[in-house]
Image (cartoon, helix red, strand yellow):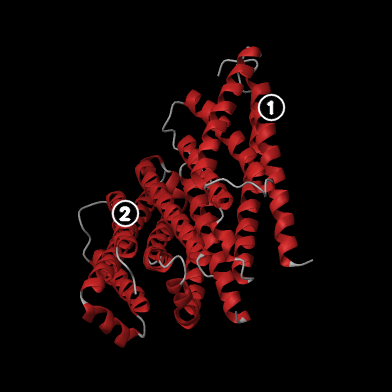
Amino acid sequence: MDPFFAFALALHVAAGLAGCGGAYAAWFALSGSTPAWRTLWWGTAFALVGFFMSYASGAVYYLSYYGKAVKPVILQGRFPWAHAFAMEAKEHLFLFLPFVTLLLAVAIWRYNKLLWDSRNIALREALAALAGVVAAIAFIVVLLGVLVSGAVR
Amino acid sequence: MDWHTFFVVIHVVGTVLGTGGATFAEVFLLKALRDGIIEPFEAEDLKVIYRVLRIGFVLVVISGFGLLVLARLEDHAQYLYSPRLWAKLMIVAILAVGIIVWRARWLPQRVSVVLGSALSFSAWYAALVLGLWRSLDLSFPLILGAYVVWFFVVLLVQHFVRRALGIAV
Amino acid sequence: MKPDASSSLEQNHANAERWVAAAACGALFALWAITAFTISGEFVGGIKGWLRAVFGHHWVGKGALAGIAFLLGSGASYLLPFQRGDTWWVRFVVWHTVLFLILLLGFFAWMGLGNAYH
């Protein structure tokens, strides 16, 4: 594989993992009763930047290399469902992440430390659920990615 | 040092911190519960151990996926379908779900402590064994089934140890 | 607390609520756009072809349209504030995300595992 596309793939995985971990950290911070402002801020920042970077690097790899060099290998190999199911599901589920993470980021940006105000408990719980769902989707996308890469032989 | 060796070193360090952390979490929890009350300084010790556990978890996940990317780039894609690998990935997921259940307080605290402790201890040691036992040739469902049995063994042993020490959770 | 500080806090809170409700509405529009174009694109051949013609690739097109939907949804919500509070909107987005996750996974499992793919 060309070093440029190898780097794009590695960056895609690393940034996606950072996004997943960031969302998990945000969930962890929001689900606690004591303010964990730094964990929340950094977690959300990692999630947002990670997902957008993963989207960009993944797009470069997918549009310029995957279609021509990888997809035919998978479809003609022992595991064609790795593209038909895993890759198709992954590329569409991933589209959810930047927008839902943006919502989380807006909430943290606008509410700031008011999120731990007593009247915002319900909102904080809802945002915790949101961060948790983002982390879960990201993890599912990671697993689907392992299935896709493992079929390239 | 090549990338493979680098990631293996990080992976081993992460496993050591995680398995060691899980072991000491158990020891310190037993020590703290002997008098039935977790004192503030005991809670601080436990917080430090849980932080070490989290660091180990992060190192293991990052280096683990680094090794997977390397396998893909070096044409060893068959490793990504290894039953041992998928069992380890499921154990990572189980650990994460366990933390969610504990943190979200979906279960009474006593049940959370007992189950969470067994889950953490059994998961880390299972991941350690799966990583070392390279010649293991079992299917994914069998490995997961063995883990479930292991979890209940750990739960039972922990129960009897607590009883022997006169600890009520 | 001085009246000025109290009213400023209330204003901050009201402002934050409006922003979050707008972002939630935008996220909802984006989720609907992604899911609708994804599923309809597999059955109506013209949709993928149109996305390819306009954006170069159907997947890039879906992302771009989701972005546009996000901006339209959040803009409309910010300018025409609805009665529901932001907590309700965030919960609504959570439920939609989970629902669409199950829907798309099931859809592609049916398409990719159930049928031969060429």
Q: Helix or strand or loop: what does disc 1 sit on?
A: helix
Amino acid on which the number 1 mark rests in the picture = Val
Q: Helix or strand or loop: what does disc 2 sit on?
A: helix
Is A144 situated left or right of C43 in this image?
right
- Rendering coords of residue B113 (x, y %): 53, 28
Task: Count residues near mark 2 (Cα–Cα under 10 Å), then give few for <14, some for 14-19, many for 20+.
Answer: few
Q: Residue, x 42% and y 72% (percent of image)?
A: A75
Along the line of sight, which residue is nearer the eye, A123 or B84?
B84
Along the line of sight, which residue is nearer the eye, B99 or B35?
B99
- Rendering coords of residue B160 (x, y %): 61, 17
Chain where mark 2 sits: C
Residue A84 visible in this rendered orientation of the protein = yes
Estimate the spatial distance between the alpha carbons at disc 2 and disc 1, rounded to whole Å.
41 Å
Q: Residue, x 34% and y 61% (percent of image)?
A: C113
Along the line of sight, which residue is nearer the eye, A140 or B134?
B134
State the mark number for residue B27: 1
Question: Which corner quadrant holds the C terminus of chain C?
Answer: bottom left
As drawn, A42 above or below B88: below
Along the line of sight, which residue is nearer the eye, C95 or B11?
B11
Residue at the outermost right position = B1
- Rendering coords of residue B95 (x, y %): 54, 42
Task: Count residues near mark 1 (Cα–Cα under 10 Å), then give few for <14, some for 14-19, many for 20+.
Answer: few
Question: Which corner quadrant holds the N terminus of chain C?
Answer: top left
Q: Residue, x 57% and y 30% (percent of image)?
A: B118
Amino acid on which the number 2 mark rests in the picture = Ile
Q: Which residue is mark 2?
A: C102
Residue B41 appears in which quarter of the rendering? top right
Residue A72 appears in which quarter of the rendering? bottom left
Chain where mark 1 sits: B
